[in-house]
Image: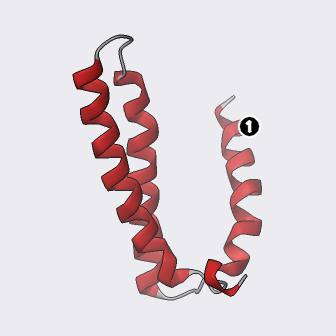
């Protein structure tokens, strides 16, 4: 099962790297962005039905980290969304 998940991740990630600037700084920034996104995904388990204060705190943290991940990834993309 783990092998299947890793293979799926590799197959999904490979085409995505075609539009990425390959520099040491971008590799570092993309790795950090991946960590932030992984933390957001892992945080999903903490949500509790009906606990609005907890949900608000988690959503604020998610938005902050997703914004940071976006800021880290954006300079490394060879095709920027504004060009569409």
In the image, 66 versus 20, the foreground residue is 66
Quarter holding the N terminus?
top right
Which quarter of the rendering shows the C terminus? bottom right
Q: Residue at x 46, y 58 (%)?
A: 34
Q: Position of residue 28 (x, y in %)?
A: 40, 74
Left or right placement of residue 75 versus residue 54 in this view: right
Neighbour class for label 1 at 10 Å: few (<14), some, many (≥20)? Answer: few
Vertical side of 73 occupied by 59: above or below: above
28 in relation to 66, above or below: below
Residue 73 % position (x, y): 48, 72
Residue 83 is left or right of residue 61, and the answer is: right
Seen from the viewer's position, the closer of residues 78 and 83 is 83
52 or 41: nearer the viewer = 52
Residue depicted at 64% across the width and 33% down the height: 2
Q: Which residue is mark 1?
A: 4
* 48 left or right of 30 in image: left
Quadrant assignment, res 68: bottom left
Decide if residue 72 is in sight here: yes
Mark 1, secondary structure of its residue: helix
- Give the answer, above or below, for where 34 lies relative to 81: above
Q: Residue furthest top?
A: 50
- Whether residue 80 appears in this view of the structure is no
Residue pictured at 48% horizontal, 84% vertical: 75
Residue drawn at the location 47% of the way across and 69% of the way down: 30
Taking the image as shown, residue 19 lies to the left or right of residue 66, namely right
């Amino acid at each position: 099962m783990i092998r299947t998940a890793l293979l799926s991740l590799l197959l999904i990630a490979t085409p995505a790297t075609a539009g990425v600037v390959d520099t040491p700084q971008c590799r570092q920034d993309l790795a950090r962005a991946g960590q932030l996104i992984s933390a957001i995904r892992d945080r999903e388990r903490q949500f509790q039905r009906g606990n609005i204060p907890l949900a608000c705190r988690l959503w604020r943290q998610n938005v902050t980290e997703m914004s940071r991940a976006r800021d880290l990834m954006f300079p490394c993309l060879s095709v920027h969304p504004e060009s569409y």
